[in-house]
Image: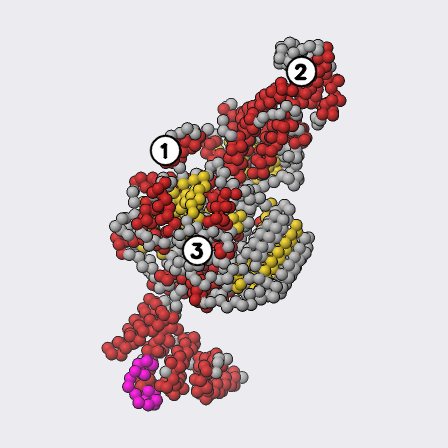
Amino acid sequence: MVAQKKGGGARVSEDAEEQSRQRLQAILLADSFATKFRPVTLERPKVLLPIVNVPMIDYTLAWLESAGIEEVFVFCCAHSMQVIEYLENSEWYSHPNLVVRTIESHKSISAGDALRYMYEQQTETSQILGDFVLVSGDTVSNMPLADLIQEHRERKKKDEKAIMTMVIKKSKSSSLTHQSRLGTDQLFIAVDPLTKQLLHYEEDKIDLAKGSVCLEKSLLDGNPSVLLFNDIQDCYIDICSPEVLSLFEDNFDYQQLRRHFVKGVLVDDIMGYKIFTHEIHSSYAARIDNFRSYDTVSKDIIQRWTYPYVPDINFSGNRPLKLGRQGTYRACDAVQSRSADVGASTVIGYGTKIGNGDIILNSVIGNGCSIGSNVVIEGSYIWNNVTIEDGCEIRNAIVCDGVKIRAGAVLQPGVVLSFNVVVGRDFVVPAYSKVSLLQQPTTEDSDEELEYAESSSGAVDHSSGVNLQIESKASELGPDGAGYIWEVCEGAHDEEWKHSVAPIPKDKLAEITQAIDDDDTEDESVLPPSGELKSDADSINTDVNDPNDDYYYFEKEVEGTFLRAIDENIKVDLVTLEINSLRLSFNMESADCAGAVFYSMMKQAVDTPHNSASELYRNASSIMGKWKELLGFYVKKIDEQIEVIMKFEEMCQESPKELGPVFTQILHFLYEKDVLQEDAILRWAEEKAGADEADKVYLKQCEKFIQWLKEASEEEDEDDEEEDS
Amino acid sequence: MPDVQSMVVEFVNKLRKRKIEGSQATAKYTVELLRSVISQHRVPHANQAAALIDAVKAVGEQLVAANPVELAVGNVVRRVLHIIREEDLSLTTAAMAGLDLLDASDDDDEDNCKGIGYPAMSAAVVAAARSTLRPPSLQTLLEGTPESATVPYTSSSGADSESKSKSADKSSITRKLKHDVIEGVNQLIHEIAGCHEQIAEQAIEHIHQNEVILTLGSSRTVLEFLCAAKEKKRSFRVFVAEGAPRYQGHLLAKELVARGLQTTVITDSAVFAMISRVNMVIIGAHAVMANGGVIGPVGVNMAALAAQKHAVPFVVLAGSHKLCPLYPHNPEVLLNELRSPSELLDFGEFSDCLDFGAGSGSPLLQVVNPTFDYVPPNLVSLFITDTGGHNPSYMYRLIADYYSADDLVM
């Protein structure tokens, strides 16, 4: 078919119908239908934002053109005039191989609306004639499409219901990588290994938080085997058949492509439509979804993963830069002071001046910027015609066109300065703040761009009620500054770091890593490898999982076991066997067992009716005396003994009235019964010595006992010494 | 006939997107494009050559800018410019000669001039002009006229010649110039198309019975060269270094085996280990610089050094379109191109190393994937071009034959 197509291209007088049938078409959504790039997108559409000094849409169009697409429908929504104007003045309008048509619609507020609009247009003009590629205008890729479209068509011929092929790419299989590379949540998909049919698609963090993924049983009925992936990155490149458009028309509530459409198709078994996946290996594809992926994709471009769409190649009317050592790209007319230090992976645009003593690292600087002396720019994206005066410090920020940063100002990590903002002298812009000349919209639908139930970036939604009280307009960025700092509500502030250009702060990183480690240890027990579910990723799931939950259940189980043991008078070794198996299935440490066993004993003592503290002590001592062996089995090591004491302390704190008075007594009892050794008690005392006053209550209570222990041990030592000598 | 401008844009696009690769294909496409540019260019009456040169230069600049690393484009553009200059020169010389003749026979009609039999222009004239008037300029041309004008009388070639009348010679010169230039460009096309055979013809003189030949990467010239020797019943073995990371050596090995040659594939890193068993290293060049240095696939320099260490002849095959009149130290020359790291590493496997969100935000992993390598002239034993074998130190001389000095800087 490809050969035919080429033949058709050569002979101009080919049958028109034949030609148009073979024509490769694409729909490019020049609107993200999201607000993640606000406030920048209030003034300029996202697809025109420069990434490494070239508007995003140029990357997408250049890729589509070289992949053999002949006609692109650019669907413009927000700022449609700007997009159309840009395209008209660009070389794409007069491109010999690629016909660019723009479609304008102001009513559409989601990808679903856009496709429905396309469908309506379609019935009138029938522009879309066959399979088409559906991408958004913020896709950077260099993958070949011809074979993929061919594959899709063949499959469609065999199976009428195969309406879509989704492009996926392998990425490292940890949620940390997902988070830190593209700022997206982890994706979980199930694929039939033979046909590559997509069976399950899960991107919502809410579902993953439960620590498990629910697959429908029918999924396993119909397929001999299912491959589960959690190390896949969705490239948001789809090959669609015309049925996709009509499906959107039929289901008027479909808004988002993934959340609604893909899930809808997967769930719906009446129509029986199927979605297939195609994995790419050597080529690059990524979508710029938020500021973090903007940063990552920029760096991938600088590192040339997107070759040939790299700054030193003139791929779309951009002026090529010269590639120097260590991956620095520099325009030939950029002026750089000798004393300036321009480090690795840096891009410097045309007509930019760099002053004395500047330090520039890992940054992209646009055209026509002027940078004063002793400026530090690190990991930042400076767009065009920005003026930076002497002594500024800019770290991990995005600075849009026309911004002025006056002398001595500091931009902390994650700052976004929208167009023409002026930062005042010596002003410090706090981390993660977004600054714009426009006020933050106070109502949700004040703009063409809308947010759709994005739990992760609900900044605007949440603050919709907040009425900004900006009287001192100019002073928000210092006395000689101009711009509003956008409010971020409390809830969203925690999420802010996820999508910002700044690297993830260390504590957050530790948190995520912690969560992952917990997952890893837990997964082994919770998800035994089953024959049917071939999991090829090492850990199946979960972003957040509270280890304490597990411990709680474990404790309950141990308690139940212990109660049964008392009731049925089961032998000690049998009880230990049972508790050991519980320990394995919950993947607990033996110290946890010690704590849990002790807890159940004390619980039992407390639950036994008693009137006074002494009675309680008697209860406890009788139970512990009876089950000394069991306890002794688990508290062999010092660590475990300390764990028991801590547990005891914890219990006392929970019910101070009942257990508080007997703390010392029971401690003493345990010591006498050789359950606890003096080392353990002393170590516990040492650990506690540095704690808060509130935590020291019980330490003080048994101060005498400890004192006595210390003396005893000293004496012993003396004895030893005497013996030695 | 499609519009020249759109053809130019299409070709520029292909070059930019790196859709067209290999110097022969590029050279062929370029020269064909330039032929259409010349043939469709409307030449003014005055100063036709300059107009043609400007037109070719304008297109040439676009093409060179589209992919500066593909030196063959620039080479071919310069060759075409040279052809225009040469033809212009010879015509002018002829005109001068005709002028002298006209002094004798004044009443000659321009339309009847053909075949009247004044052998105004001949190879001798051109040769004389070439030798005496380089670099050609109007000044020297005029000064040189008296002596060269004497040549026609003695030369006896009855080839096509034209004598021009003072008044009406312009249009006919124009027509003639364009015609001659296109003729010259056609010759160039022919030459580029036939360079493989020309080079391969010499194979038998260089490859001997039972020799072991080492090559690196894949080159069509090398393939044809080896096969030509094979056809002449020479039996020899070929070691093919695979040419990581693109592994074009694998393709070459396949082709060689298909043509019945004994082939051994080795890794690039094994070149030094194997070189002692090799009788000759044969390499296809990407470009040959004016100093005799060679730009070839990455890894070639290593092979050249190994060959020098073991005193193995290092032979470079290059069609004349690969001769670049520039020196490698020229800042205008882009010697290398860094390709995508995905040829080296699997992105999926290494995505965690490219994690910018964590840590300092700067990538700790860098991947450098250069396409080409530079071999200095002292490591090259012999160049085999379509005009025969040459020493590296002779390259500048060949280049002087092919290019005019005015075009070196475009």
Residue at 30%, 81% (x, y): give it.
Answer: A604
Chain bearing mark 3? A
Chain bearing mark 2? B
Mark 1 → mark 3, Cα distance in angstroms: 38 Å
- The stretch of residues the image draws in magenta is A601-618
Res A129 quadrant in image: top left
Q: Amino acid at mark 1?
A: Glu
Residue at 61%, 32% (x, y): give it.
Answer: B57
Q: Mark 2: give few (<14), some (14-19) or many (20+) Cα within 10 Å.
A: many
According to the picture, the residue beneath numbered tag 1 turns out to be A17
Q: Mark 1: give few (<14), some (14-19) or many (20+) Cα within 10 Å.
A: few
Residue A340 position, x and y percent, is 66, 55
Q: In the displayed structure, would residue A16 be above or below residue B158?
A: below
Which of A72/B315 is in front? Answer: A72
Q: Which mark is residue B164?
A: 2
Q: Amino acid at mark 3?
A: Glu
Q: Amino acid at mark 2?
A: Lys
SS state under label 1: helix
Chain bearing mark 1? A
Mark 2 → mark 3, Cα distance in angstroms: 75 Å
Tell if the residue under mark 2 belongs to the same chain as the one under mark 1. Answer: no
